[in-house]
Amino acid sequence: MTHDDILKAAGLTQDDLHGGTLAVHSPIDGAEVARIRETDAAEMPAVIARAQGAFRAWRQVPAPRRGELIRLLGEELRAAKAELGALVTLEAGKITSEGLGEVQEMIDICDFAVGLSRQLYGLTIASERPGHRMMETWHPMGPCAVITAFNFPVAVWSWNAALALVCGDPVIWKPSEKTPLTAMATMKIMERAMKRFGDAPDGLCQLVIGGPAVGEALVNSKDVPIVSATGSTRMGGIVGPKVAARWGRPILELGGNNAMIVAPSADLDMAVRAIVFSAVGTAGQRCTTLRRLIAHNSVRDDLVARLIKAYGSLPVGDPRKATTLVGPLIDHASRDRMQAALEKAKAEGGKVHGGRTVTSGVPQGGAYVEPAIAEMPAQTDTVRTETFAPILYVLGYETLEEAIALQNDVPQGLSSCIFTLNMREAETFLSAVGSDCGIANVNIGPSGAEIGGAFGGEKETGGGRESGSDAWKGYMRRQTNTVNYGATLPLAQGVKFDF
Ligand code: NAD
């Protein structure tokens, strides 16, 4: 299929694609595929006012009825999976199966949110006073801004939007300026769901297009109580304090620097499979990509040899081809950052395998690279920095204590894992003295989370949680209610106030 066929199949019209100022390029070949209209900063107050108007109506709609909208969205996504997945491949460069997987993740979170819409449970709490009852009630918060990164151009919106909408919050989405087309196509799918739903209020689900300035209008508005922002730690460092300064609620999902510890007892065959998928999948451009391999000194050389062999057989190329496993980086600047990191790693004493630019057998114009392995003498500055590309740094260790200390000694705290068949080691890794990350796994890699669990991380990863478990609480306000059904007015803590 040509680029134009893919855009058309995803429902984008010539009007959508032309006449604007924001150029959109496909990472497959660098071709400009659209020049779309950006939202003017002057339009933002009206966008936010529409969301506030929608909130006044939507918060009164019973939550299970709100869930019906998400059920319909799930149905529409199922019907459009192939077309939207292909557009993810075109615009973000993901291989076909990962493009489809991203849409499947949207469907999964819809299913989760539909069930949630009949739950949103509060507690009942024992009161210390006779004739009293205490409980917790969860209420909608208001408009939720969703600022997303290029590497999960549609799934991250759905993690937020499916929950926010069943929780009673309108959503304003600002996608990455590198991937606005997948967002526009997703909005068309959402519009179909809203049409079938019937009476969704105007402004319930909006899309704004542009770069940081458009995002900042949402970040700075007191009328947007929740700002869920996914992207670099640099962006979160700007957005988080601004939202906090106006007493809004930030949900920050920022960079990761994820590690795997491979212990002496590990099943190395399984470890190799997990390492290759999590270090190389999505061309190393997942927030949960494996970036640091901390291998016991007794298995390190064997493991590195197996990895070098496996890396040598990885097909790099056009992400639309069924056999390709490593697609392009998002752009040439990203490839330059990868090359600079590898040069720095060498200067720090690292031994680098692979990492060269690939120009033959790949579409011209894209930024294709061989994934790299860098054996490092220590956890240097370069290793402690997230470079958003397929570089796997390898470190050795002697004791588990040392391995856990290395794993935790980075600014980020997203995902982590250990490969071991030793129960003491596995449980220690998951315990209070183990991994300090939001995600810690045993005998599976750090990437490819399911939607059922809460997703997010600590330290410079931002502390936010999205997706499953009770992450929905981040989109609602908690109210503690005490009801006195007695005929006296006893005070808590035995306080007397007689007059
Ligand atoms: P980025 O920080 O460049 O951009 C992310 C989004 O933030 C974009 O929509 C951008 O326009 C917006 N933005 C940037 N500055 C802003 C500002 N001052 N105010 C408001 N909005 C602003 O990130 P990217 O290059 O698109 O994505 C890669 C990064 O995202 C990596 O660091 C990756 O680890 C991270 N990421 C994290 C998660 C997670 O869940 N933790 C998921 C995906 C990606």
Image: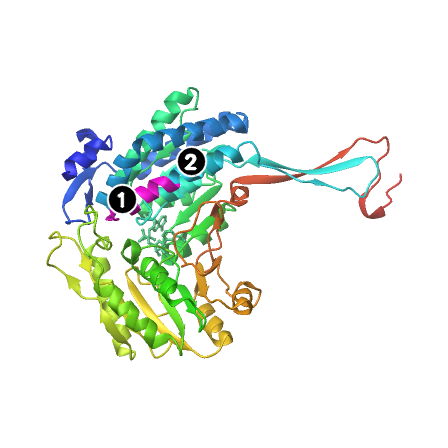
Residue wearing tag 1: 179
Residue 479: horizontal and vertical position, in percent? Answer: 64, 39
Disc 2 residue type? Answer: Val
* Percent coordinates x, y for residue 460 in the rendering: 44, 60
Judging depth in this view, the residue of 416 and 269 nearest the camera is: 269
Residue in the picture at 26% in, 78% down: 347
Judging depth in this view, the residue of 201 and 121 nearest the camera is: 121
User: Residues in magenta?
Assistant: 93-105
Q: Residue at x 45, y 62 (%)?
A: 417
Q: Residue 89: name its quadrant.
A: top left
Instruction: Find numbered disc 2 in the image and state the secondary structure of the residue it sits on.
Output: strand
Q: Residue type at mark 1: give it.
A: Thr
- Picture layout, residue 332 above or below residue 48: below
Q: Return the mark for residue 45.
A: none
Residue receiving disc 2: 171
Looking at the image, is mark 2 or mark 1 earlier in the sequence? 2
